[in-house]
Amino acid sequence: MAHPANQRGAGSRTARVGPADGEVAPLHLVAPLWNAGTRGIRGLSSAAAPEGNQQKGRSLLQFLADRFYDVQALREYLFRKQAWKMHQKNRPFTYIKERYGPYAAGAYFILKLGGAVKFQGKEWIRSDARGHFSLDFLKLQMVPIEAVDASGCAVNYQGLDNLLALKELQVLWLQRCPHVDDWCLSRLHPLANSLQELSLAGCPKISERGLACLHHLQNLRKLDISDLPAVSNPGLTQILVEEMLPDCKVVGADWAQGLKLGQEEQYRDIASPIPA
């Protein structure tokens, strides 16, 4: 009589995760053939304690290779799923832009991400705790947006397309945005005539190379570059940015911080023992 596990495992199993429209291919987890049986996603839980004939028939190497195959396939699928979600969040809202104009499309994009926008002469518009917001701003299709708060939002290089059409934008807050990097800063030059305040505080992917791209923004009056972990020398970087933008108030690390950090590293090098 066939083992119950072999009867249950006959055929490959398919775990489908994602939208019904088929944007992301379904996940297929098929293990090597063991005792005329296969394991799919359900095998991840049972692989830790093989029993009966399966335990006798498989070697330790086969067991580890099979489990690694399942985990690797699952990781690759989750990575593709995450990339697809990021693409969906930053896609251009072409229908809204064509029907209501670039201001409404830009506002809808930011509000969908959980940010806030301010039209000229109006109060700030924000989404609630559940991410819901009123669509009354669609009536303001002829009113320019003067300020955008995208703090902590999942804005990336692609998503900036929704903001570069806001030619009257004066204030842009991008602090703590995990996907804003040096390439994103290189795209801000279309806002050079209007942008007066820019906050990049706490963005983990911004370095000195990206800050050098801001030389186009000569109308900036305030720039926050504090708490940028990818910047190796904050004090010296602030001095260079101030020279690059002489009319802008640069907020960030004090110039002495870089010198202090450099001296501490030098002291550590002197105090550390010489390797044999």
Image: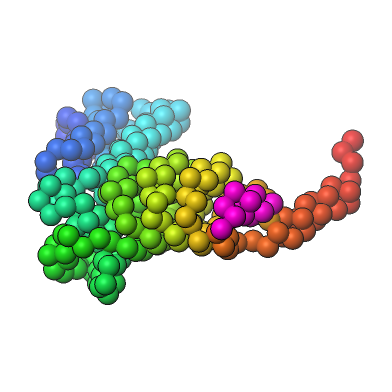
**Of 151 and 28, which appears nearest the observer?**
151
**Of 19 and 209, which appears nearest the observer?**
209
Locate the C terminus by quadrant.
Answer: top right
Residue pictured at 57% horizontal, 52% vertical: 245
**Of 29 and 24, which appears nearest the observer?**
24
Residue pictured at 34% horizontal, 58% vertical: 169
Locate the N terminus by quadrant.
Answer: top left
Q: Which residues are magenta?
A: 236-247
**In the displayed structure, would residue 200 be above or below residue 7?**
below
Name of the residue lying farthest toward the bottom: 123
Residue 242 counted in the magenta span: yes
Residue 153 shown left or right of residue 109 in the figure? right
Instruction: Determine the main secondary structure of the stretch shown in magenta.
Output: helix
Residue 216 shown left or right of residue 4 in the figure? right
**Of 123 and 205, which appears nearest the observer?**
123
Residue 240 shown left or right of residue 148 in the figure? right
One can see residue 48 in this view: no
Residue 267 shown left or right of residue 86 in the figure? right
Quarter location, residue 140 = bottom left
Residue 77 x %, y %: 30, 38
Residue pictured at 77% horizontal, 58% vertical: 260
One can see residue 169 in this view: yes
Residue pictured at 30% horizontal, 38% vertical: 80
